[in-house]
Each structure stands twice: as C-alpha cells, then as structure tokens.
Amino acid sequence: MSATLAEIADRAEIADLLTARARAADRFDVPLMRACHPSDATDNHGTYRGPMHGFIDTLESAMRSGPFCRTKQHLIGNMLFERRGADWFVETCHVAHEEFAAGSDWIAYDIGGRYLDTCRRVDGRWLIQHRDIVYDWSRITPAGERDLDPLTGTRDAADPLYAGRPQTRGQLPKIIPPEGAPPMNDLDRLLSKQAIAEVLYRRARAGDRADAELAHTCYHPGAIERHGVFDGLATDFIDVASFTRPKPGSPIKGMQHVVTNILADFEDDDTAFVESYHVAWCQMTDGTDATIGGRYLDQFARRDGRWAIVHRDVIFDWSRVEPETEKFWAKHPAADFLYGKRGAEDPLYQYAKRGS
C-alpha cells in the first residue's frame, strides 16, 4: 500500500473513531467511551481538566445523581488532519444538542464548537490521546415534547441501535473483516464507504427536493422502511405514505436534511450496517418551523456492483416545533436570492438531472 493510500486509510479509521466517540456519548455507552482512549489519555473539557478516564467517571456520577439527560446528539463535521510525527492532530467541528430535566420541564442546550484531538496508534489502532474542547457558540431554549415509540432513541441498551445489534454496544468500529470473511482490501473499503455516503446524501436530496424517482434509486428492490407509524416497502413509503412524491395537501413548504456521523460496519465485502445522524429542518404550511434530530439505521448491500439500502429504520432522538420567524432574506428585498423548491423548479436542476 502506498504512503498516500496508507494516510487516507488512517484518516478514515480516525474519522470512524471520532464518530464512535460521539455515539458513545449520545447513547451513554461507557465501555465504548473508554475504548476510544488509551489508559493515559487526557482531557480539557472546560468544566474538567485531567485524565480522560477520570472525566468519564464524572459522567457516570452525574448520570446517577442528575439532572437526568434524556437525549444527546453530537453532529460531527469538518475534519482537518495534520500529521505530527507518529501522531495525527485533528480539528473537528461539532454541534451538540442535549436535553436535561429542569423540575417538571425540559431544557435544551445547543452548543457549537470544535474538538482538538491528538490521535495515537496504540496496539494496532488509532485512539484519542488528548482532547481539547473549544466552545464557539451556544443557546438555551425550552425542549420540545417527545413521542415515545419503538423507534425513539434512548441513552441506554434499549436504544434501537443496541436492541437490534446488542453486540455493537461497547465496541469500537471493526478495522478488519470478521473471522472467516474474505479480506476487503483498503482501497475497496474506502471506495465502498464513499459510495454508501453518496447514497445517503442522494436519499436526503430526494426527500428535500420531492424527487421520488431519485429516492427509488437509493434502495434495492423489496427494501423495507420503518419510519414513524409506517412499516412496509420503501417503495410504498416513497410513493404513498410520504410527501416525497409531490401531491396535494402536503404540509411541508421547505425541507433540508443534513446527514453526518456515518459509521459503516462491514459484515463482508458486499454487506454493511450503517448508522448515520441527521437533522431535518421543515417549514410547515401551518406557520410553524419543525426541527427533528435523529438517526438512520440502514442495512446496505452491494448487488451487481451497486450499493443500496435493503432495510431502513428511522430513529427519532429529539424535535422542536416553533412559530415561523421572519426570514433573513426579507431584510434584503432588492436582492436576487435563489430559493430552494420542493420540485423541479429548484435551482439545482439547472445543473443536475432530476431522478438521478
């Protein structure tokens, strides 16, 4: 393997590590938190400075003593890597959404910042040796109501991720194929990860732009989708149950899904289980704005050289519904803005073909 490909493989493994660390915090998976750091790792968290495993001890104590945290979602993006001797230094942007009990109410904290991580190879894999957390912005608001159903996220072993895959809890992402599986070479693995990510992005585009034909290309025939009260064929969700195919009476004026934290667990060369995070912003026709944070739990397969979804569970972790506010662009009435549309009139389709 060339040095360039080796470095790309390092970066991909570290990206998975940082994503797993976010999963560990969000699902309160203490063994996984500890597995992301060597025994002598250190942390500067603002409220805490010292050994990383001591910080994890404080989290366990806070979970017992309260206030109770019912949901967390750490969105990971913007990773920049710099090689420093045998180590990697990584700056990563993140946005955290957390909801805590406050008497009979719930308070939401939104925090934007960065991780400044020094990553070191320990016993054959990359771990986080030191972490500084930089705080860039924050806000505190009342938290929204939660509809509890089997696809609502939790911060324990009952979460749908662990209910369906209990072997995942406490485990770092695999960096080698399972015993007995044919080896997947590094280049194929990297290309497969990219192909899977692009399927997830296209599926988000399809929902936002109400492009049903594009949505269909993201699934293999016979794929199943569980999405709120819907549980059936993905084709029926796209064409009948949802508003992916434009139809009269849609309650949605505008929509944007941002997909992050893609963590692929390859079971063999041609199958992978993929957890990804999303936040959806929806402008509704009733004068409200809805924000929804959650995850996709997707089973992917490669058939005839094409990666696509064969089963999708949509997990809801948090949401907020607020009155619609004045728009930024209303302050510039003479400006020639390009506005997003849920249909073929969207500016995208001056450059891209709809349905592909």
Image (cartoon, helix red, strand yellow):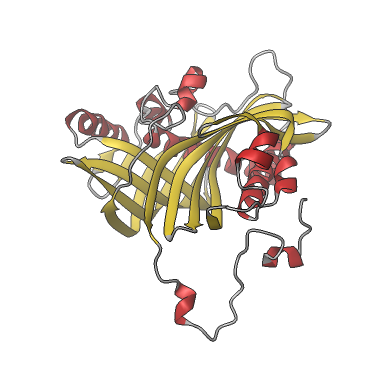
Q: Which residue is at a point 76% across and 56% down the rendered structure image? A: 354
Between 263 and 106, the one lying in front of the other is 106
In the image, 112: left or right of 224?
Answer: left
| Res. 3 image quadrant | top right
The x and y percentages for residue 237 are 64, 37
| Res. 159 image quadrant | top left
Query: Relative to 347, does residue 214 appear above or below in the rendering?
Result: above
Count the marks: how many? 0
Between 268 and 317, the one lying in front of the other is 317
Residue lying farthest bottom?
334
Would you say residue 249 is visible in this rendering?
yes
Q: Which residue is at a point 55% across and 51% down the rendered structure image? A: 257
Residue lying farthest right?
304
In the image, 187: left or right of 116?
Answer: right
Between 45 and 6, the one lying in front of the other is 45
The x and y percentages for residue 217 are 75, 41
Between 285 and 306, the one lying in front of the other is 285
In the image, 188: left or right of 128?
Answer: right
The x and y percentages for residue 295 are 50, 38
Residue lying farthest front?
248
